[in-house]
Amino acid sequence: MYHEGQDRGPVVGPRELSARFPELGRELLAQADALFPVRVTRSWLARVRAADDPLGRQALPQPAELLPDAQDRPDPVGEGMRSPVPWVVQKHGDRALLLLTRRCHLYCRYCFRRAPHEAEDPTEPELERALAWIAASGVRELILSGGDPLAVSDRRLFAVLDRVRPAVPVVRIHTRAPITSPGRVGPALVEGLRARAPVWIIVHCNHPDELSADVDAALARMVDAGLPVLNQAVLLAGVNDDAATLAALFEALVARRVFPYYLHHPDHAPGNAAFRLAPERGLALYREVAARVSGLALPRYVIDPPDGRGKLDVAEWVAAGGQRPVPSAPASPLRS
Ligand code: SF4
């Protein structure tokens, strides 16, 4: 865990950031940190050229973050109404999500789970209750999320995987660690995951400049071990909202044997208004990208509305005038 004054460690906090980026100002860093931690890994920092470049904007606060916006939603994707027990979210019958921790190596300023919470980690009884619920639920696929599930130790992670097997055959780990903290993907982690296959790794990379040599090595370690690796990106104003950047990102991922699984429309979390763009504009960009790249390099572009009913394609959302389309009635059975 980071504590102010430990700025020589792998994670940098407001004090060192204010020295490196004096234009941000100590006051902004302190106020933003009080709302949602300001922590940046040294690996990421080495890739930032300026506070307002695509990587700087993702990790460093901007003044707009402190201002409320009329479109802010306290629970932007409706997880609260889909939580059968604390730390579990279930939107679909065959799968569920376990929030293993709320801690991250780097805290993305646009994060849709950036609302304050009472605890960073489940207590042991809470984790036991969540695992018991999962085992009895009949779900076939468990998504470990957070926070970043790789912010917990290998021991804890493997213990959770071993507890849910064999009841849950497939596990996904949604993690940004290979991108923000590639050193986390060490031999013990990779071997432990390989031994517990099938474990799917869903990383989170938004811009081609995130793919530094240490990230490439971390991705290669996982792919070489036979772990399926997919990416989910978020479309972010001022970061990757142009077709050339998105096409370059998706093609760079494919070249690294990582499938670009999803492009998410940004959710309306308090504090992230500066990253939002209209779905219509996002769809126009997506169509431009689709005309440039191969099918292998084209993710699904989806939106996750606050009704808690899960993702849908942005094209459907836009066609329905900015709402979830009403499903058409099943055809009447033919009568003889
Ligand atoms: S790593 Fe994921 S959970 Fe953590 S701040 Fe970034 S987007 Fe949010």
Image (cartoon, rainbow, N blue to C red):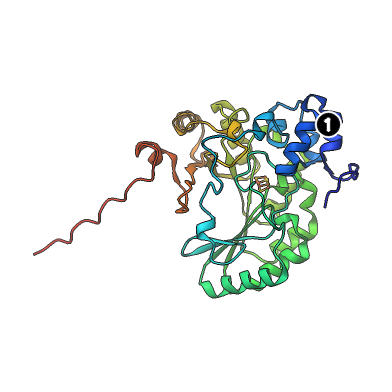
Residue occupying image coordinates x 73% and y 34%:
60
Q: Is mark 1 within 8 Å of ligand 1?
A: no
Residue sitting farthest toward the top: 23
Q: Is residue 165 visible?
A: no
Estimate the x, y position of residue 20 in percent, counting from the top left. 85, 29
In the displayed structure, would residue 51 be above or below residue 326?
Answer: above
Estimate the x, y position of residue 79 in percent, counting from the top left. 54, 55
Residue in front for this viewpoint, 111 or 329:
111
What's the residue type where badge 1 is placed? Ser
Residue in front for this viewpoint, 11 or 212:
11
The quarter in which the C terminus is drawn is bottom left
Residue occupying image coordinates x 86% and y 35%:
16
Residue occupying image coordinates x 79% and y 24%:
23
Residue of label 1: 18
Residue occupying image coordinates x 77% and y 46%:
181
Q: Is residue 335 visible?
A: yes
Residue in front for this viewpoint, 265 or 124:
124
Estimate the x, y position of residue 39 in percent, counting from the top left. 78, 42
Estimate the x, y position of residue 88 in percent, counting from the top left. 58, 63
In the displayed structure, would residue 143 be above or below residue 104?
Answer: below
